[in-house]
Amino acid sequence: MKDVNDEIYARFIKIVEKRTCYIPGSLLEEKIVEQIKRKKRFNITGIAVVAGAIGIFTVLLLFNSLGSNTPTNVNQRPLYSLYENIQQVPEKYEPIINISLVSDGF
Amino acid sequence: MKKFFSVLLIIFASIYIFSFSYHAFRFVIEYSKDIQFTRYEEVFYKDGNKIVFVKSPKKIIWVKLGEKYYMGTSEKLKLCPPIKDLEDIFNDYAEFHKISQDFDGEITISEDVFTIKAIKIDGMLRKIIRKFENVVTEMQYIYIPTTYTFDEVLSNFELIDESDVPEKIYDILNLFLWFNVEYVDDALKVYAVDKNGEGVLLEISDKKGKFKVDNFYISILEASEETRKEIENEISSNN
């Protein structure tokens, strides 16, 4: 039984050696446990950071698209005389829009 | 008889000599820190009259003939309220300040809320620049010789003395320095700058609004107290 355990232990050490480059010593098991914990911690932090970034990006995108559909307050809008208004509008409004396009003021 | 013909010759010669015309392409660029708009147009000018082919952002033709203005998108042009480009605005302010148009170099006129500068080389306008807060509007000229005369170009159009724009609405817009419009929720939002440089927001609708002007309704959504009163006075004087 001891031989089997030794064999498994030896194989395990080999795998760990390959993955961690640690030379087996008296504190090997503690080191492995610590490493695994660190790896796990890093993974959780990494996932949290990526998820957070995606979340913020989505929220910003959502607010941006909502903002573009909302009529702007006159004080928030730069006051241009040459605003490129090429919207499709009912015919009744077209002359007023055309004047605003070709006129630079009064 | 000889005297009569001499006088007639002198009159014709002086008309010919003092007649002023040009054909030019004009680029109007309006920009601030983070946004830019452009307009591109071809102009036939003769003695204060103009035929302007706006090519971008939308094909529109407008004509100034004496005190009358016509506008359209085909060969049929309908009567419309006065249209002023940067050149007309500069000329108006130069005239108001009694500044001679006969200059070479640059002249800047400073008003309370904006400045307007014109640059002339060899007696021809090359650039007009208006600055309001952080918004700059610039008109650049490129003069090109043409084989067409003003009258030949004008003969391609049918001028109709009937307007699509209610004159009463124009009188209200005329209270501002300039304006632009946006079609939102089945109504026109008019964003304007009043004579004191303050922002104004009006809504023109054919369904609802505070004041009825011709076939439209007008609501004043934002304006300084002074401008609000001016608009209301204009509406009540119109009705």
Image (cartoon, coloured by chain):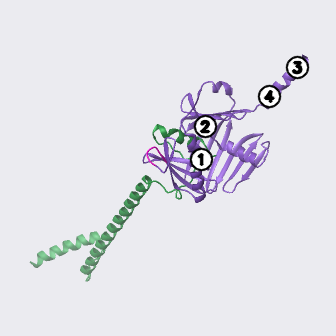
Chain colours: A green, B purple
Which numbered marker is on residue B237?
1
The answer to whether tags 2 and 3 share a subunit is yes
Given the image, on which type of amino acid does mark 3 rest? Answer: Phe
What residue do we see at 64% from left, 27% from top? B154
What residue do we see at 64% from left, 42% from top? B85
Label 2 or label 1, whichever lies nearer to me, is 1
Q: Is residue B226 above or below residue B140?
A: below
Which is the main secondary structure of the residues drawn in magenta? loop
What SS does tag 2 mark? Answer: strand
Which numbered marker is on residue B4?
3
Which numbered marker is on residue B41?
2
Given the image, on which type of amino acid does mark 1 rest? Answer: Ser
What residue do we see at 36% from left, 66% from top? A52
Residue B207 falls within the magenta-colored stretch: yes
Chain of the residue that carries numbered disc 2 in the rendered image = B
The answer to whether tags 4 and 3 share a subunit is yes
Label 1 or label 4, whichever lies nearer to me, is 1
Label 3 crowd (10 A; few <14 / some 14-19 / many >=20): few
Given the image, on which type of amino acid does mark 4 rest? Answer: Ile
Given the image, on which type of amino acid does mark 2 rest? Answer: Glu
Between A57 and A32, the one lying in front of the other is A57
Label 4 crowd (10 A; few <14 / some 14-19 / many >=20): few
Between B138 and B183, the one lying in front of the other is B183
Q: Which residues are magenta?
A: B204-208
Chain of the residue that carries numbered disc 1 in the rendered image = B
Q: What residue is shown with label 4?
A: B15
Label 1 vs 4, first from the N-terminus: 4
Q: Is residue A51 above or below residue B106?
A: below
Where is residue B222 drawn, in percent x and y?
Answer: 53, 56
Label 2 vs 3, first from the N-terminus: 3
Image quarter in which the C terminus of chain B is found? top right
Which numbered marker is on residue B207?
none
